[in-house]
Image: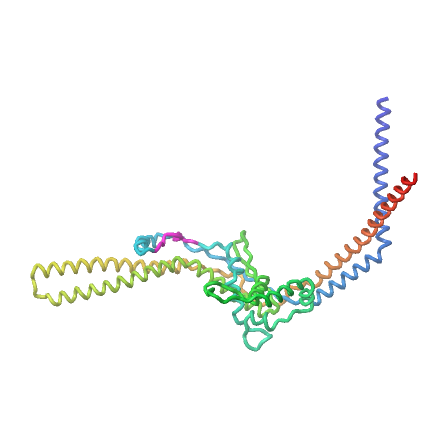
């Protein structure tokens, strides 16, 4: 009996598997049939996707990309040579000990510098040679006076961007920009803000932690202009980093320079006073004269000692400024691009063709799903009516 029951169970399991596989085959056949029946719908959507892709690919503005690769060189840490300044600075109320241990600017901050408002403001006000003008003009002038939005830009502006256009018009008519006591604050006009926003999208700085390199990339509509802007941005980045890095060293240099000039003047005065006293008392051998000469000599020696020490410290401070000046070693220099980087027309057409096919298939199955739901509702309504009559 046990053997017979186990055989029956196996047969039942095989029958269930066979029926489920048959159902899967039926489902696949049904799906294929539905797709074949609705092939016209799919073809229409695919053709529509191709047309949209062609429209976008042909009307998208060209862009050229320039990438320059650099290696940041770290500054030498070491504050031993300047350690003797701390006591002198403390006497004058200047704290030079904080950040004196070779403070370095992490390359991770470089992208923030490139995207900062002061950096972009300086970049947009720099004149460049452009095809649109006979004389060099700034990026700000180009974007506010010369650049005209393309077809896609106009469509986007007055469809997706229409609320922003309306809000901007309302703000212009209702708000007045205050020009009060804010001279010390950085304030961008609405036009400058828009140009800075555009430049943030066109300018980027990527860091490769594994190789220890940074890549500055600029994408603009003209190959020559792109190379000019990339070269200028590279120079500005070097200058901004240098300004931050040598700030402490320059503070130290300024302090030592001031003390050095003071002691130099004091030393020259005492030197003249001692020489004048000796000239006047050549043949005088009184104790008072000798005591006065010894006092002047001691004062002269002490002042000369401080003066000599400050001269050494001044030279060390000047050396430290040079040591702390960072260097961006250029691995891949800026080059004028020969080919455009965007738009990738074949890829745009492929993507929109694929999207059209997906929408077409979804439309067919969506209609079937809605028809099934509608049929079930009707069946439930009929069932409820029969139950009500009975």
- The residue positioned 84% from the left and 26% from the top of the image is 6
In the figure, is residue 87 to the left or right of 296? right
- The residue positioned 72% from the left and 58% from the top of the image is 351
Residue 154 sits in quarter: bottom right
Task: Give the x, y percent position of residue 33.
Answer: 86, 50
Front residue (pair 220, 196): 196
Magenta residues: mostly which secondary structure?
loop
Total numbered badges shown on the rendered structure: 0
Q: Is residue 66 visible?
A: no
Front residue (pair 122, 17): 122
Residue 252 sits in quarter: bottom left
Colouring chosen for the image of the structure? rainbow
Q: Is residue 138 visible?
A: yes
- The residue positioned 82% from the left and 49% from the top of the image is 369
**In the picture, which quadrant includes the N terminus?**
top right
Residue 312 lies, with reference to residue 191, above or below; the image says above
Residue 358 sits in quarter: bottom right
Front residue (pair 205, 112): 112
Task: Give the x, y percent position of residue 103.
Answer: 42, 53
- The residue positioned 65% from the left and 69% from the top of the image is 149
In the figure, is residue 305 to the left or right of 317? left
Task: Give the x, y percent position of residue 117.
Answer: 52, 62
Which contiguous range is marked in magenta? 94-103
- Toward the right, the furthest residue is 390
In the figure, is residue 184 to the left or right of 97? right
**In the picture, which quadrant includes the C terminus?**
top right
């Amino acid at each position: 009996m046990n053997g017979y029951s186990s055989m029956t169970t196996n047969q039942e399991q095989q029958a269930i598997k066979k029926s489920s596989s048959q159902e899967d085959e039926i489902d696949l056949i049904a799906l294929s049939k539905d797709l074949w029946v609705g092939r016209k719908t799919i073809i229409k959507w695919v053709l529509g996707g191709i047309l949209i892709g062609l429209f976008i690919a042909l009307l998208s503005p060209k862009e050229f990309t320039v990438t320059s690769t650099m290696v940041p060189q770290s500054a030498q840490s070491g504050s031993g040579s300047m350690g003797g300044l701390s006591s002198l600075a403390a006497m004058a109320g200047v704290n030079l000990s904080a950040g004196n241990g070779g403070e370095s600017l992490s390359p991770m901050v470089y992208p923030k510098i490139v995207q900062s408002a002061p950096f972009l403001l300086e970049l947009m006000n720099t004149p460049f040679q452009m095809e649109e003008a006979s004389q060099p003009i700034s990026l700000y002038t180009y974007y506010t006076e010369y650049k005209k939005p393309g077809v896609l830009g106009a469509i986007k502006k007055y469809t997706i961007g229409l609320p922003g256009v309306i809000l901007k018009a309302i703000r212009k008519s209702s708000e007045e920009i205050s020009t009060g006591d804010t001279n010390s604050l950085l304030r961008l006009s609405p036009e400058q803000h828009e140009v800075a926003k555009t430049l943030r999208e066109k300018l980027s700085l990527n860091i490769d932690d594994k190789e220890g390199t940074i890549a500055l990339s600029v994408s603009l509509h003209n190959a020559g202009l792109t190379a000019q802007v990339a070269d200028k941005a590279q120079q500005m980045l070097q200058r901004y980093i240098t300004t931050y890095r040598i700030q402490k060293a320059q503070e130290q240099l300024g302090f030592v320079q001031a003390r050095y000039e003071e002691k130099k003047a004091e030393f020259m005065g005492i030197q003249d006073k001692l020489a004048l006293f000796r000239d006047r008392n050549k043949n005088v051998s009184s104790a008072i004269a000798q005591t006065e000469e010894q006092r002047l000599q001691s004062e002269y020696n002490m002042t000369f000692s401080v003066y000599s020490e400050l001269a050494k410290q001044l030279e060390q401070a000047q050396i430290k400024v040079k040591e702390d000046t960072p260097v961006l070693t250029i691995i891949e220099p800026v080059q004028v691009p020969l080919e455009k980087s965007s738009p990738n027309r074949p890829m745009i057409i492929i993507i929109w063709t694929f999207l059209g096919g997906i929408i077409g298939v979804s439309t067919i199955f969506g209609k079937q799903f809605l028809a099934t739901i509608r049929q079930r509702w009707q069946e439930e309504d009929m069932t409820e009516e029969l139950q009500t009559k009975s």
